[in-house]
Image (cartoon, helix red, strand yellow):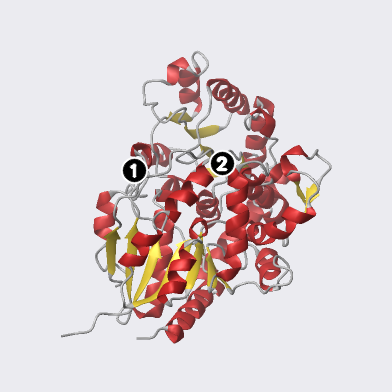
Amino acid sequence: MAMAKPTVVLLPVWASGHFMPALEAAKRLVAALGADLFSLTVLVMRPPTPDSASERVPPPVARESSSHGATGVEVAFVHLPHVDPPTDCATVEEFTSRYIRLHAPRVRAAVSPRAAALVVEFTSTDIFDVARELGLPAYVYFASSAAMLALMLRLPALHHEMPTEFGEMDGGHYVRVPGLPPVPASFMPASVMSKKSPSYGDTLYHGGRLVDAAGIIVNTAVELEPAGGAAIAEGQCTPGRPAPPLYPIGPVISSAGAQSDGNHECIRWLDAQPQASVVLLCFGSLGFLGAAQVREAATALERSEHRFLWVLRTSPAAGADHLDGILPEGFLDRTAAAGGLVWPLWAPQREILAHAAVGGFVTHCGWNSVLEAVWSGVPMAPWPLYAEQHLNAFELVAAMGVAVRMEVDRKRSNFVEARELEHAVRCLMEEEEEEGRRARRRAAEAMAACRKAVDAGGSSDASLHSVAARMRNDTKW
């Protein structure tokens, strides 16, 4: 009887924006280890609420991924037993951390004796204790930027150094995040703006525990964030203690469930538009605009006189029949005639960004969306809404140069005035705008660098094989 292969155990967060990229990264890792020698085991946590259940990996995708697939990787999905979610959490970050922590006994029971390593996300550092009890190396898959990783590693020291809270600092205060230009305090991630918030304590806790990882696999490329990666590797973020080895393997962009094979209505509409003539506005699965903001944005788009595709969702319950009540009177008819499409449902964002008709992207700056834009060489206008998106927005403009500036009023729930959005759209789409020319040039350069990085022999490919070699050497079987 053939002996079971050693297996890499992945514990991803349930939401699809985390689950699918983590799964894709793990499959790449096991392929680098040798699909004939190693397998992948995915521990699936039950989504804690009915709403979040719809965000997790769709069943057809899970079934498809459970086969060997194009990489030849054998994947087994193990569904962990039910855990009652906490009911007294004040923030999403606190809830996520506590819900994952409750799964520790289930994870311990589910890990195979043939496990070679345990890979978790940064909100799951409590699972390091399980790995230690089982004698396994614990790696972190970090789904966001090297800049956010640098901040998290630096946060325990910053906590003692900063005289006041980031949210109470005025516009003249800057934060030193290794690898970035001085960051205005107003661009700090939402989770750390107030020390009184439970989310601050959770972020601080996980930042302090990251140094205990056997290594951190991060979804970026050396060429995309050279200074951030170097700052981490040189110990600038963890004074007095060496940082874990860093393995940038990105961009990791999951295609599962994201393609329409060109049959989606948005793709067919784009087929009829001139090259690089359309600006895309899309704000992720959790990004919703209020009625006043929708009207302001509509005014901006109409004044800009540029073609647009606006993926507009105003609430989780909103459907396709609600637009007339929130958009300016006659807006849909006027803009449709001029080359505008408002789409109120899910849209295949990656496929849209890859379309030749798209020339700019107004984005909430979720890291998956940023990488999809970079992969297709599309310049951006950052409209951050939550999580670490404000820090991403700063980096896109001030460090990477792949985006144009847009004033977002964080004190007014990230409100953007019509004139700001109109100006950003013109910068992205009009040749005479110098800021836009620079962003387009840098976006094209970033696209070429990232594609080269993941090719055989590129920096991300080399990093992937480096972490695979370390796992292979540490394997007991």
Q: Position of residue 130 (x, y in %)?
A: 43, 67
Residue 263 lies left or right of residue 130; in this view the side is left
Q: Residues within 10 Å of mark 2 (few under 14, many from 20)?
A: many
Q: Position of residue 385 (x, y in %)?
A: 58, 38
Q: CA distance from mark 1 to mark 2?
A: 22 Å
Q: Secondary structure at mark 1?
A: helix
Q: Residues within 10 Å of mark 1 (few under 14, many from 20)?
A: some
Q: Where, quadrant-wise, is the N terminus in this rendering?
A: bottom left
Q: Where, quadrant-wise, is the C terminus in this rendering?
A: bottom left
Whether residue 386 can be seen here: yes
Instruction: Determine which of the numbered discs, if any, sits on residue 364 in the image.
Output: 2
Q: Is residue 336 above or below residue 372?
A: above
The amino acid pointed to by label 1 is Ala
Give 76 or 284, whichever is nearer the viewer.
Answer: 76
Q: Position of residue 9 (x, y in %)?
A: 37, 69
Q: Position of residue 13 (x, y in %)?
A: 42, 54
* Residue annotated with mark 1: 53
